[in-house]
Amino acid sequence: MKFQFTFTGEEQLRNIEGLLDDWFKGGFPRDAVLPFRSSLLKTDDALAAASLYKRGAAGLRDDDTGKLFFPEKIPKQTEIPEPVFFETWPDFINTRFTQSHDREKTIFVLDKTLLSHHPSVARSISKTKARLFIFECTEENKNIDSLARICSEMTGGLTSVIAVGGGICCDVAALAGCLQGLRITLIPTTLLSLADAGIGGKTGINHRFAGKNQIGLFARTDEIICIHELLQSLSGDLVTDGLAEILKHSWLNGNFEKWRPAAEKLLSQPAGSAFLDADVQQLISENINFKRSVTGADPFEKNLRILLNLGHTVAHLLEALILHQKSGSGEVLKLSHGMAVLSGLKCLLENSLIGSAPDGFHQLISAILKRRNIHFPLFDLGNETQKAKDILIQDKKNRLASVSQEELRIRCVLPQYGCLNRIPDSASADKFTDACIAYILPDELIGYIKKSGIIS
Ligand SMILES: NC(=O)c1ccc[n+]([C@@H]2O[C@H](COP(=O)([O-])OP(=O)(O)OC[C@H]3O[C@@H](n4cnc5c(N)ncnc54)[C@H](O)[C@@H]3O)[C@@H](O)[C@H]2O)c1
Ligand SMILES: [Zn+2]
């Protein structure tokens, strides 16, 4: 059955949410055949819910009639568009947007914080006939309420959405655009969203108890645009968060030596000025193209794309554990995603789990962590080992291998430096990916994290 969704209003999304809640409570895996009752919810809406559940396009069983449904996946996007670069926002609006025929049928979803740095962006949009939705981009707002509000703004014959903002803005606007069948243009404005989040078609929102990005779709992105001027307002912290994913990419494709000068410029110069540098622009462009090539080869995360999770198993664990930790002075500790990824890389390197690093790699990780004032050990795990194990087992990315409950092992991505220097062809991609993966006992993994001094 084809995935066909016609948005009929906020209430419909509420009903879908109710079904998703039930499935999350039931702990169904992403590829399960999920139960619903056609007496309570329309089959089309239940199919939409199944496609959104853990971004899995699961099957569906109508418990009233016993009928089974399997939604067709959204057509695979083999060619992720090449990014188009503009120096300034007026360049984009004047040369590209005002000439476009469908500007009256376009909605911009704008990141509110971005707007506080670049108020002329909203002014120039209001001079066109496009619609404008200003979105307060926080993880708390990355939820079904915002999705419903944005979808409601997209009615009335619109044909395209342009998201301008960081990863949160791009993830939510693209999901709404996909549900509404609009053409999707992303203008990522953080280094992390440019180098990583905005590229590859994953969209999503958080679920209030199941967690981050648990509701979403693989969407087709029609256009990716980078506007240098918008990057000049990035803080040092936002730059280092983006650098973390760039370093991860450099490990995978073996480009560290080549990218190092630009990465060091980003680290050492005031953020705004560094983005004007030709080396930095080249760095951004090559990162986008690397992510495009991996996600284009594996749009639905069946094999190669899994390798992009390098450092993330440890990162997700630290991010989840740290939510409840306090520093010596009683403040709640904070660890951004980028810094958690760097901590994850540090752990893998110091336990010799991914082979040896090129000169300067480890030092750059340490310099970034130092710049962000991250001190190890981050915290003392104390008697929370069981909690850490539960987090590892529940993380949807940590596919498990098990012989028995006691033997549950966590999937860890352990690639050697430069392994994706050339993208393997589709016939060998499964085998290639398997060779870069190890299944590790939760206790063993926690032991590695302690051994590298990241936690005590
Ligand atoms: N879809 C994917 O494949 C994917 C991959 C990785 C991460 N993500 C998601 O992306 C999000 C993280 O993205 P992010 O790091 O961009 O975070 P973000 O969207 O929260 O942006 C960080 C902060 O920067 C502000 N901001 C945006 N552009 C700015 C600019 N030019 N100048 C100054 N401030 C600016 C935002 O308002 C926000 O306060 C997470 O929700 C994560 O789950 C998605
Ligand atoms: Zn990441």
Image (cartoon, rainbow, N blue to C red):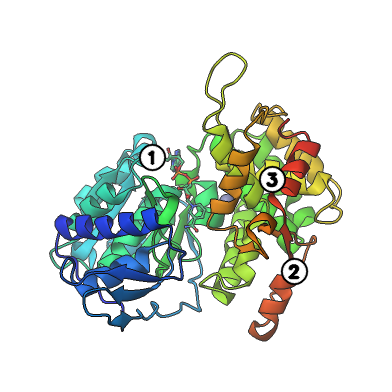
Q: Mark 3 is on which residue type?
A: Gly
Disc 3 element: helix
Spatial distance from mark 3 to mark 1, Cα to Cα? 24 Å
* First along the sequence among labels 2 and 3: 3
Left or right, 117 with reference to 451: left
Marks 3 & 1, CB-CB < 8 Å contact: no
Q: Which residue position holds label 1?
A: 138
| Residue at (69% x, 49% y) in the render | 442
- Vertical relation: 31 (above or below) 9: below
Q: Mark 2 is on which residue type?
A: Asn
Q: Which mark is residue 344?
A: 3
Quarter location, residue 307: bottom right
Query: Residue 243's spot in the image, x, y percent?
Result: 63, 46
Q: Is mark 1 within 8 Å of ligand 1?
A: yes
User: Can residue 424 be seen from the camera position used here?
Assistant: no
Q: Which residue position holds label 2?
A: 421
Disc 1 element: loop
Query: Residue 61's spot in the image, x, y percent?
Result: 31, 75
